[in-house]
Image (tube, helix red, strand yellow):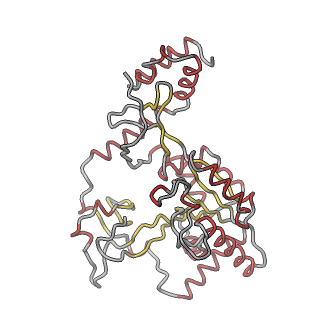
Amino acid sequence: MTYTDEDITLLKSFLVAHGQEHLLAHWDELSSDQQDDLYRDIQSVDLENHLKSFQRCMQKELSAPEKEDNLQPLPLDACESVFISNKINERWTNIGLKEISEGKVALLLMAGGQGTRLGVPYPKGMYNVGLQSGKCLYQIQAERVRKQEQLAAQMYGSSESIRWYIMTSEHTKKATVDYFKSNGWFGLSEENIIFFEQEMIPCISLEGKILMDSKSSIARAPGGNGDLYRSMKNEGVLQDMLKKGIRSVHCYCVDNILVKVPDPLFIGCCLDRQSDCGAKVVSKAYPTEAVGVICECNGNWKVVEYSEISSETAHMTDSEGKLLFSQGNICNHYFTTSFLTKVIEDKESELIHHVAKKKKVPTATLR
């Protein structure tokens, strides 16, 4: 037993104060081992912060939708294009390759998801996309990493390795690590591939009650991409980046088969502009394409989902007939480590997570 009667009394008072006393409703029915498990499970939850985060989510969810009158396209001076000048593109690429050669570039891959929607029972990154080569997403990306290292070495005489941070989930980490091992790390250095887990966070009902999947354990689910910053802090990823002298971080999602990783042109553009963060976008193919767009809303830049934009707004054009809201978000980002430090250390607790309403969260019906 890892607690005293006084500990349980204090825990009950704490739970009552936060409306979560149901977590101990069946305490007296549990065996000693089950009580130990439940006590540790509850203690492992940062209850106050999770409930505050939930309240912020629900306030956002229940508030009136943002008026489309408040939506504005991004200012022109905030945007760059690869279609303007080959000479500028070459300069940006060279800046990016130099950053790679000096060992200041890292990749941050969000790869927590299973391939369920693709019809396979294993992590998305292991998916064979149907190429004649039979290569999976991980192999395609690893080979692109190696190529950029080679290009940087050719241009600047030598090159440091690109550090690759891969965020998995509790359910995908072992399979992912084993897959990399069995494939010889796809020709990359094992020491430069760092796997870390996104957190498993408590599931909460719409009434604000933490759910349980049994009388002695809390129901949990992966925090998703929105939990990236907290996972980077708790898993020591940010600290490792700073220790290794990383300055530029290229962040992306695993299921982007066309992603160029790392992209020296994108990195060089952000460095040249002295930008703390950047987002690579693609022009929408047509007004109602099902993709979120990056725009300005109430003075803040954000991604607005396609479902939150009316057809009338989506069809708005400028004087040249081009769509006003055309910057399609493809979850492809640039961060400096100084920006990540500021967000993780000072702002993470203020971020509003997206509400994911799940019908199939395994829960126990407790009476």
- Residue 60 pos. (x, y %): 32, 47
Q: Is residue 70 left or right of residue 343?
A: left
Residue 160 falls in image quadrant: bottom right
Quadrant of the rendering where the N terminus is positioned = top right
Task: Examine the rendered structure and indicate whether residue 299 appears above or below residue 46.
Answer: below
Of residues 98 and 333, which is closer to you in this image? 333
Q: Residue at coordinates 63% horizontally, 54% vertically from top-left?
A: 176
Q: Is residue 345 visible?
A: no
- Residue 312 pos. (x, y %): 21, 70
Q: Is residue 321 left or right of residue 26?
A: left
Q: Is residue 229 visible?
A: yes
Q: Residue at coordinates 50% horizontally, 19% vertically from top-left?
A: 11
Q: Residue at coordinates 58% horizontally, 65% vertically from top-left?
A: 250
Of residues 261 and 116, which is closer to you in this image? 116
Of residues 7 and 133, which is closer to you in this image? 133
Q: Is residue 48 left or right of residue 40?
A: left
Q: Residue at coordinates 50% horizontally, 25% vertically from top-left?
A: 216
Quadrant of the rendering where the C terminus is positioned = top left
- Residue 186 pos. (x, y %): 70, 66
Q: Which residue ends up furthest to the right in the rendered image?
A: 157
Task: Examine the rendered structure and indicate whether residue 361 appears above or below residue 12.
Answer: below
Task: Examine the rendered structure and indicate whether residue 96 appears above or below residue 331.
Answer: below
- Residue 272 pos. (x, y %): 57, 74
Q: Which residue ends up furthest to the top in the rendered image?
A: 5
